[in-house]
Image (cartoon, rainbow, N blue to C red):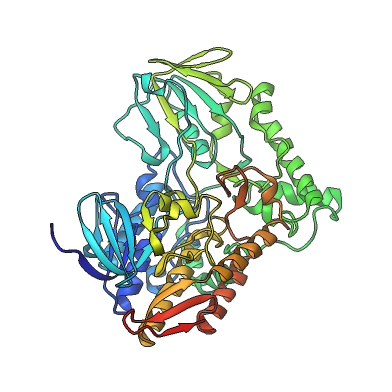
Amino acid sequence: MAAPRQLDALIVGAGFSGLYMLHKLRSEGFSAQVVEAGSGVGGTWFWNRYPGARCDVPSVEYSYSFDPELEQEWTWKERYSAQPDILAYLEHVADRYKLRDGITFDTRVTAADWDEDRSRWSVATDRENLFDARFLILATGALSEPRLPDLPGLENFAGPILNTARWDDSVDLAGKRVCHFGIGSSGIQTVAEIGKIVGELTVFSRTPSFAVPCSNPPLTAEQSAAFKADYPAIRQMQRHSALSFAELPKAGSAKECDPAEREERLESAWTASTFSMLMEFDDLLFDDESNALVTEFAQRKLAQTITDPEKARKLIPQGSPIGGRRLCAEIGFYDVMNRDNVALVDVREEPVTAITADSVETDRGSYPADAIIFATGFDACVGAIKAIAIRGRGGQAISEEWADGPRAYLGLAVEGFPNMFTITGPGSPSVLSNVVISIEQHVEWIARCMVDMRENDQQVIEATSEAEQEWMDHAHEVAQQTIFPKVNSWYQGKTRDGRQVFMPYVGGVGAYREKCTQIAQAGYEGFHLSKAAQSGETVAS
């Protein structure tokens, strides 16, 4: 077996995070290599090729901001770009910055072990590639490890079984009888597309989502030029706003607004953009009464849209504040659900009892199926990290450390796992932000940290247990002031005894960025830094 390849940094994943991390470290003179399980770049946008896949953040915002020349040379076709266009953009980035020679494709990282004697990571893959790296950087993505339901008899099904996160383009669904599980963001997009071509469609739902109309006309040349001219202001607003969007919440309280004016404002916001409903008043994510008024409005709008009262009963969320789960964008979903050849099953009322060779059985009936589709979400924020056998100081496993809930200092580093960074990890704004802007901030912070360590002859950095706990306590305290913990959603991590831990940081992207900068300027407060292992000298920060 070949000797391990020596690196400054081993990066896992070639999506938005991994590509920029590789480019940034190379520009700072570090040796770095990306290991990617797929056969191409793109991360989420490589794997999620299901019909209708597109981003629900405007593409002029959901794009890199680190290079003004890149902003000017790339032109987006639509307001909310489809998966092929986003993938083409990331492929362009890989080619423009000559990154492909720094990526090992079709290879999955299986294990990483911290060698305390040498202060380095030993990394193994499923292709017997071995790496010896000073730093391990996990650019694995928050939504990349699919979660499948445990359905009795699934192994008996004779037809194709598809997953939106691992789509098989070779399967022809035209005219087929299809059973589809899940109507979160991916499910809503998939149903809207396959509903146009299948013969019969049965949608199985457990928890319905609020979905708002997504107006998505092509971008004109004039609109593109205007966006490019405004990019400096757009980026400044993104980096320092609460959710890293160029659209800011409007001042005022929904509960204090005149009812007629509130209705007029919400009508306008309903079709304005994916998240305009949540931006119309600045207290919707914090005040139960204000949120309830907007939730009731959204329920009325959906009741007017869904023609079958029984389907409406099952599709309209009840007892859940709008925005507590991810607000979805829909293009044609409710039109499809209104069709006579589309059935809807609420599995809370009608549990699945068995899967046969050609049907899905419930305790009330049988639903024929030529194909089954799962759009049942991900092991969010932590799944892709826990899928790797990572062992830190003293051989402790990350999967065991996170069994009682994910924890990390700033969402960047985990106590007990030196020289390991988690890009947009738990405890950072991550999925409650425009994630590309959050990714850039993490990449730039990590690169600055590595440069500072190199200049100060420091070899090891590790979050202290006290700083990590204080940060997680702070993140928890901030979350309790919002509507988010009141909802059972994938934003919540689970402990081994079933308790929920809210994973993203909701204190605001701008405030978070300032905190990270202050910590770096203070000599990496909350981290323990040490020089070369053989010297024995330490510098505590």
In the displayed structure image, the side of residue 481 where residue 517 appears, left or right: left
- At 34% across and 19% down in the image, what residue appears? 158
Residue 152: % across, % down? 46, 22
Residue 106 locus on image (x, y percent): 24, 50
Res 392 seen here:
no
Q: Residue at x 36, y 48 (%)?
A: 84
Please determine whether, in this image, residue 79 is positioned above or below residue 52.
below
Q: Is residue 415 left or right of residue 254?
A: left
Residue 101: which quarter of the image?
bottom left
Q: Nearer the viewer, residue 339 or 522?
A: 522
Determine the residue located farthest toward the bottom in the rendered image.
456
Viewer-closest of 176 and 286: 286
Q: How far across and how far down the image is residue 444, in percent?
A: 44, 73
Q: Image height check: is 36 above or below 117? A: above
Q: Is residue 319 left or right of residue 349?
A: right
Q: Could you tell me which residue is drawn at 61 percent across and 41 percent down?
A: 211
